[in-house]
Amino acid sequence: MRKIVAWILVVLWCLVIFYFSAEDRSDSHQRSKEISQIVNKVIERVLDSESVALGLNKSMEHYIRKASHVVEYFILTIFVFNAFILSKIRCHKRYMLSFLIPIVYASFDELHQSYVPGRGPMIKDVFIDGIGVLLGLFFCYVIFSNRKAIRGIVSRRRMT
């Protein structure tokens, strides 16, 4: 049952990515603009300077859009990796497939964007998605290779 749930999470997350990619340019731009305004307000409060936040405003949207690519594919990679663990796929094959599947999906997602009004495929975005994939694999490697130590910490906390 856990294996089925893990694969359902992979499919659902792919649908989330597809949904965001299917937004036309103006809707996507508006979402990025709203997020950048929130980030600017936080910067303004932390730095106590409105001029610094205003100067960052124009480039902030671009970086938020690219960071969202990294986060989307970081999460997808973790879901795929977990599904392969539960499917009992061997170690090296698990890492290779957990890299290839999100990268192939990112490529198809960019192709999908060529059919969305105001958007188009950008190979650069596949490379940015790849950063998220690599970070996700690194995260999985750290967690998986230290799982005995993590279990020990968790079990000690339960005892106290």
Image (cartoon, helix red, strand yellow):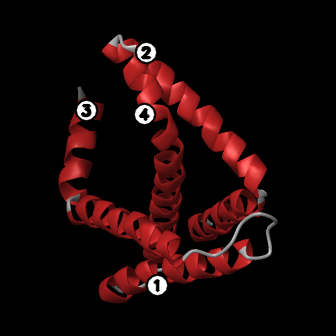
Q: Position of residue 5 (x, y in %)?
A: 63, 63
* Mark 3 to mark 1 CA distance (whole Å): 37 Å
- Image-based side of 159 in relation to 135, left or right: left
CB atoms of marks 2 and 3 within 8 Å: no
Residue 6 or residue 24, whichever sits in front: 24
Q: Position of residue 159 (x, y in %)?
A: 25, 31
Circle 4 crowding by C-alpha within 10 Å: few under 14, some 14–19, many from 20: some
**Of circles 1 and 2, which is in front?**
2
* Mark 2 to mark 3 CA distance (whole Å): 45 Å
Q: Position of residue 35 (x, y in %)?
A: 58, 35
At 68% from the left and 72% from the top, the residue drawn is 120
* Mark 2 to mark 4 CA distance (whole Å): 10 Å
Residue that numbered label 3 is attached to: 157
Circle 2 crowding by C-alpha within 10 Å: few under 14, some 14–19, many from 20: few
Query: If you read the primary sequence from the N terminus, does the residue marked by circle 2 or circle 4 appear first?
Result: 2
Q: Label 1's element?
A: helix
At 58% from the left and 65% from the top, the residue drawn is 6
Query: If you read the primary sequence from the N terminus, does the residue marked by circle 1 or circle 4 appear first?
Result: 4
Query: If you read the primary sequence from the N terminus, does the residue marked by circle 3 or circle 4 appear first?
Result: 4
CB atoms of marks 3 and 4 within 8 Å: no
Residue that numbered label 4 is attached to: 56
**Of circles 3 and 1, which is in front?**
1
Q: Label 2's element?
A: helix
Label 2 sits on what residue type? Answer: Glu
Quarter where residue 21 is shown: bottom right
Q: Position of residue 117 (x, y in %)?
A: 82, 65
Label 4 sits on what residue type? Answer: Leu
Residue that numbered label 2 is attached to: 50
Label 1 sits on what residue type? Answer: Leu
CB atoms of marks 1 and 2 within 8 Å: no
